[in-house]
Image (spheres, rainbow, N blue to C red):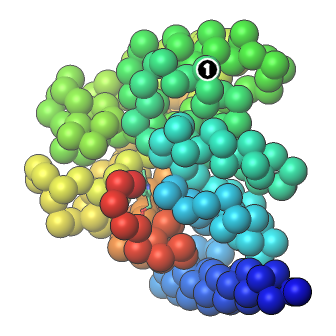
Amino acid sequence: MSGWTDRVTDRTQERRAELAGNLAAVEERIAAACAAAGRARDEVTLIVVTKTYPASDVRILSELGVREVAENRDQDAAPKAEACADLPLTWHFVGQLQTNKVRSVVRYADLVHSVDRLRLVDALSSAVMKSERADRELGCLLQVALDAESGAEGSRGGIAPDAVEGIAEAVAAAPGLRLDGLMTVAPLAGPYAGQPRAAFDRLAEIASCLRAAHPAANMVSAGMSADLEEAIAAGATHVRIGSAVLGVRTGLG
Ligand SMILES: *Cc1c(COP(=O)(O)O)cnc(C)c1O
């Protein structure tokens, strides 16, 4: 009679043990990287990227103490966030964002890490002001493309470093938006290909210029499963970790 439920429970227990083990290993890496860089552990926040994995995993992660999760595609994120609306989670949106998805994203996202054009700034601002969350600002990070030439867009989204100042001003002036900092993904092409530490050092320089004009914009979101140590050494305040916690993704994502 209870065989089916027992098997489901066994599988949940197994997955919980796996996620707990992976989280502990990532936590150890973060702690070691902070120690090596002479930084306090609480200077770095772990964001777990749950893309392609089900809401049931998000629930287990929440029970294991995770408070920050990230998604990169609205189609997957919107139903997942709704299924997890009872959990005490902060939702980060880290994927390339089309303006026709903005209205959906502002319903669940607390922060968007991938702000990379003025049209998107306008769309986010008006969506927040028209939504039920008009009293709750949306945190915005500008995504910097370190493989982009001046004025161009990066191959994985993002803006060239010399466009940061202008878009930062636009976010700072936009109703409903809060300028929180910068994000990058280590580039696969260009002068920083294969050199995550140099890329993250460059991001830190740009972040320091940004803080000179906008002191509260102090988030530096950099580092993924493969390069979190380099990011923490370079001063990242937030690391975005997917596969090292949830497992290697198959297919899209
Ligand atoms: C998928 C993703 C991550 C996490 O990558 P992993 O290599 O799985 O840790 C981080 N940032 C962004 C923008 C992503 O899309």
Question: Furthest residue to the left?
Answer: 190
Q: Residue at x 37, y 67 (%)?
A: 250
Q: Residue at x 30, y 51 (%)?
A: 202
Q: How far from the left and from the top, in percent, is residue 69?
A: 64, 56
The relative height of residue 127 versus residue 217 in the rendered view (above or below) is above
- Give left or right: position of 108 versus 30: right
What residue is disc 1 on? 103
Q: Where's the N terminus, which quadrant?
A: bottom right
Q: Specify whether residue 234 is in view.
A: yes
**Amino acid on which disc 1 is placed:** Arg
The relative height of residue 131 versus residue 32 in the rendered view (above or below) is above
- Give left or right: position of 186 versus 140: left
Q: How far from the left and from the top, in percent, is residue 173?
A: 59, 13
Is label 1 in a helix, a strand or a loop? helix
How many badges with numbers are in the image?
1
Q: Specify whether residue 9 is in view.
A: no
Q: How far from the left and from the top, in percent, is residue 137?
A: 73, 26
Q: How far from the left and from the top, in percent, is residue 191?
A: 11, 53
Q: Quadrant of ligand 1?
A: bottom left
State which quadrant residue 15 falls in: bottom right
Q: Residue at x 46, y 19 (%)?
A: 99
Q: Residue at x 31, y 37 (%)?
A: 157
